[in-house]
Image (cartoon, helix red, strand yellow):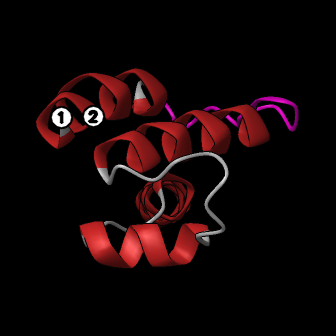
Amino acid sequence: MLSVFKSVFVLILTYSHEYRIMAERILPLAQAAEMGLFRRVHAVKCREKVLSCEVRKALNIEPLLLQLTGSQLRWFGHMSRISRE
């Protein structure tokens, strides 16, 4: 199931994200969809009080929004170097 997450979900959300800013209303929806998938993979029921950070730690996955931010900063670094030349 995590392979489906990496091959489909991540690609859809990260398509052209380097130069596009995600709308504020999309960010919580993306986080909710991501955690819903992780909770299903980790077999955590809705009524169980398990924190999202614990689920991520058990699956050894970093947040997708953290990956997006790092990639956008990397892209910004490339663009700033190009504009100097």
Viewer-nearest of discs 1 and 2: 1
Q: Position of residue 31 (x, y in %)?
A: 63, 45
Instruction: Determine the CA span between mark 1 and mark 2.
Output: 6 Å
Q: Which mark is residue 5?
A: 2
- First to last magenta residue range: 17-26
Name the amino acid type tagged 1.
Met
State yes or no: residue 15 in magenta: no
Looking at the image, residue 29 sits to the left or right of residue 14; the answer is right
Q: Residue 24: name its quadrant.
A: top right
State the residue at coordinates (40%, 48%): 38
Q: Which mark is residue 44?
A: none
Relative to residue 26, is residue 3 drawn left or right? left
What is the quadrant of residue 82 in the picture? bottom left
Q: Nearer the viewer, residue 4 or 19?
A: 4
Percent across and percent down for residue 29 are 72, 32
Task: Please identify the residue farthest to the front as the structure is shown.
Answer: 47
Q: Is residue 85 visible?
A: no
Residue type highlighted by circle 2: Phe
Vertical placement of residue 54 versus 41, above or below: below
SS state under label 2: helix
Other residues around mark 1 within 10 Å, as few (<14) / some (14–19) / many (≥20):
few
Asked if the residues shown at circle 1 and circle 2 are in contact, with their CB atoms under 8 angstroms apart, the answer is yes
Q: Residue at x 48, y 62 (%)?
A: 63
Residue 76 appears in view: yes
Q: Residue 1: which numbered mark, if any?
A: 1
Vertical placement of 66 versus 82: above or below?
A: below
Q: Quadrant of the N terminus?
A: top left
Q: Is residue 67 above or below residue 45?
A: below
What is the secondary structure assignment of the residue under circle 1? loop
Residue 21 shown in magenta = yes
Q: Residues within 10 Å of mark 2 (few under 14, many from 20)?
A: some
